[in-house]
Image: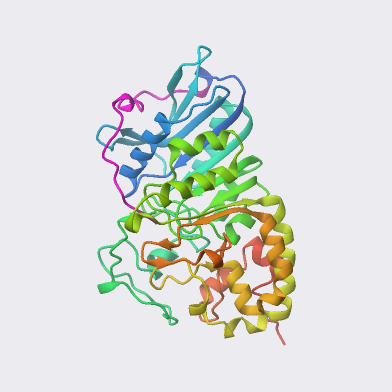
Amino acid sequence: MKIFRHIVALLSVVLTVLPSCSKVEPKDVVFEEKEKTLLLYFASHNNLYMDAASNISKIIKGYVPSDGNIVLYCNNFDLSTKQMKDTLPLLVNISRNKKGDVQIDTIYKFPYINSCTKNQMKSVLNITKTICPARHYGMVLWSHGTGWLPQGYYKTHAFTSSDEKMMYSNQRSRFPAPPGGVDPYAHMVKSFGSELGVEMSVFDIQEALGETHFDFIAMDACFMGGVEIAYQLKDYCDYFIGSAAEILTDSYPYDTVIEKMFNDDYIGVSQAIYDYYNAQSGEYRSVTIATVKCSELEAVADEAKALFEDYRDDIPSVDPTTVQRFFRYDDHWFYDLKDFLDNLCGTSETVAFTSALSKAVIAKYTTGRMITLDIDPAKFCGLSTYIPDDSETELITYYQKYAWNDAVKMIVPPTSD
């Protein structure tokens, strides 16, 4: 889910950046190996396409390294109108030639295929590494997002951007529903991806990444800054960047953050995202963002496991309304990880966990709100988590697939007598 804010002014210099062309075979365009290739994967064949075009304009007018490639996987946009020319996705490379001039090349045009599938993401990665090889890689995933939830679950169990009230079946509705069943701010916000009803699970992303290791993976999508996501991807990247709450459709300030991504300043990436939103006013002064050092997540899991061993049976007694949440209305699947454990165990018991978490979450920022939701900076640890509810049998079963749950044993299958 993303929240719409259309940017009217677009640079005339970028109007022909994504030209129509016949299919470009990888063998025809081969680039020399550079220091880093940054792949920005825009799954934007949905209601976010105009925002994708605005974001791409920011990328093009921003930083372009002399020893790196910026590769965009995106739809074929006419940036002057922010409309899609057709539904055939492209790979576009932005780089500097030997003279130092910025050059923009369409290096591959795919036949139509749904972007929210593991096979397409795998194909994009393989072609990118073949045509734009590098010693290091970074990746940004841009689209809708529904955190760790099963594919399609959010659409059927939450109040979303639909004009009609979604059916809501959960019995634990302790938080308010939107007025008339319609979220009045849904036009502002963005399982990763959504295209023609198809979504990717985090397990699909994991399989698509294969053996590729990234310096960082950033999730420019709503609710993807959960410990479940970060832990699942920890062996695929050195740093993970994401939002525990929603992300506005302005997205990241790509005209400033890409330079930091190339310079390995991942703390600075989160700082720049925060600075951009903190300078806004009204509902648009809304962000949560964090940078996680993945090598430290194992220690976080070890400490969490020790706590759950002692307090697992007390989870049903935790009152979710007392825990910092990251959702508006009653989409109650995303709570602050540390605040949940503090409520469950008591702060005196979470000292070792807090210490381990502080080494893993190396940067965390919030403006103190997400549209109408208050977020207490003192309770914001940078990562969200699920608070189990035994009545949500589908989620309880699905959650046990995650490596995080396997490591910490928050939810354990019932033992047979």
Q: Residue at x 42, y 65 (%)?
A: 154
State which quarter of the image contains the N terminus: bottom left
Q: Residue at x 55, y 64 (%)?
A: 380
User: How many numbered discs, if any?
Assistant: 0
Residue 116 in view in this figure: no
Residue 377 in view in this figure: yes
Along the viewing direction, whichever of 261 and 78 lies nearer the viewer: 261
- Asked which colour scheme the image uses, the reply is rainbow
Q: Residue at x 63, y 43 (%)?
A: 210
Whole-percent x, y for residue 349 in the image: 71, 76
Along the viewing direction, whichever of 89 and 271 lies nearer the viewer: 271
The answer to whether 133 appears left or right of 371 in the picture is right
Whole-percent x, y for residue 86 in the image: 30, 35
The answer to whether 205 appears left or right of 331 in the picture is right
Position of residue 345 relative to residue 134, above or below, is below
Magenta region: which residues? 1-26
Along the viewing direction, whichever of 412 and 9 lies nearer the viewer: 9
Q: Residue furthest bottom?
A: 417
Whole-percent x, y for residue 215 in the image: 63, 40
Query: Is 304 included in the stretch rendered in magenta?
Result: no
State which quarter of the image contains the C terminus: bottom right
Position of residue 83 relative to residue 310, above or below, is above
Along the viewing direction, whichever of 238 and 400 lies nearer the viewer: 238
Most common secondary structure along the magenta stretch? loop
Whole-percent x, y for residue 168 in the image: 37, 75
Q: Residue furthest top?
A: 99
